[in-house]
Amino acid sequence: MKYVEAFDNWLRLRSPIDMIILGLGPDGHLAFLPQGSDPKTGQLASRVRLWPGLIDWKWGLSSEACICTRVASAQTCDLLRPPSHALTITLPTILTAKEIILMAFGPGKALPVYQLLEGEDGPQRFIAQYLWAAEGRVTIVLDEPAAAQLSRTSEACCC
């Protein structure tokens, strides 16, 4: 826990953060924060247990991005297996940032972006929807495959 406390103190000295760049997980998670994360925690940093779906998604061999993640981690951290925990930032840290950049790359990110924009599930079930509290400070960046699939997803869902 000493690392969480050190990171939390470091963040307190620098808060609010000018810009946070986050990826959008296929299940709507942000910064390794699972569904049901507490948006009112007093901490700015957190140690979270990684859930099996996330580990499978991050460390699987099903895509080039996953292979790159495994290779890069193995080269820099000597990891032979996926980690069980991560040190990350909390929802209050994200929501107080002056600018939030949310990246969604690949066709598999179209549905989570659609769910974020439509807001049907609510933030307890789809954590990225907490970003609505940061209205006007969030920029969503899509690549071409995600944007093309989003267009098809929204047409299929709305017609």
Image: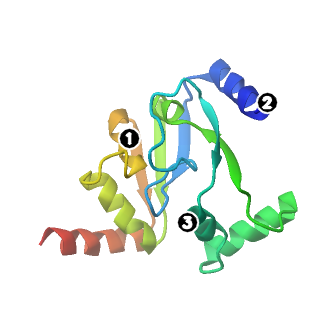
Q: Determine the residue positioned at 46% across, 64% down.
A: 26
Gap between marks 1 and 3 measured at Cα: 21 Å
Residue at image point 59% right, 27% down: 43
Q: Earlier in the sequence, mark 2 or mark 1?
A: 2
Q: Residue at x 35, y 66 (%)?
A: 111
Outermost residue on the left side: it is 159
Camera-side residue: 105 or 157? 157
Q: What residue do we see at 43% from left, 73% from top?
A: 107
Point out the residue furthest to the bottom here.
62
To which quarter of the image does residue 123 belong? top left
Residue 3, image quadrant: top right
Name the residue that disc number 1 marks: 130
Tag 3 secondary structure: helix
| Mark 2 residue element | helix
The answer to whether 17 appears left or right of 120 in the picture is: right
The image's mark for residue 53 is 3
Mark 2 = which residue?
A: 2
Q: Nearer the viewer, mark 1 or mark 3?
A: 3
Q: How many marks?
A: 3
Is residue 80 positioned above or below 25 on the image? below
Callout 2: 10 Å neighbours few (<14), some, many (20+)?
few
Q: Residue furthest right?
A: 78
Q: Are marks 2 and 3 in contact (CB under 8 Å)?
A: no
Question: Mark 1 belongs to which amino acid?
Answer: Tyr
Name the amino acid type tagged 2. Answer: Lys
**Is residue 130 shown to the viewer in this render?**
yes
The quadrant the C terminus occupies is: bottom left
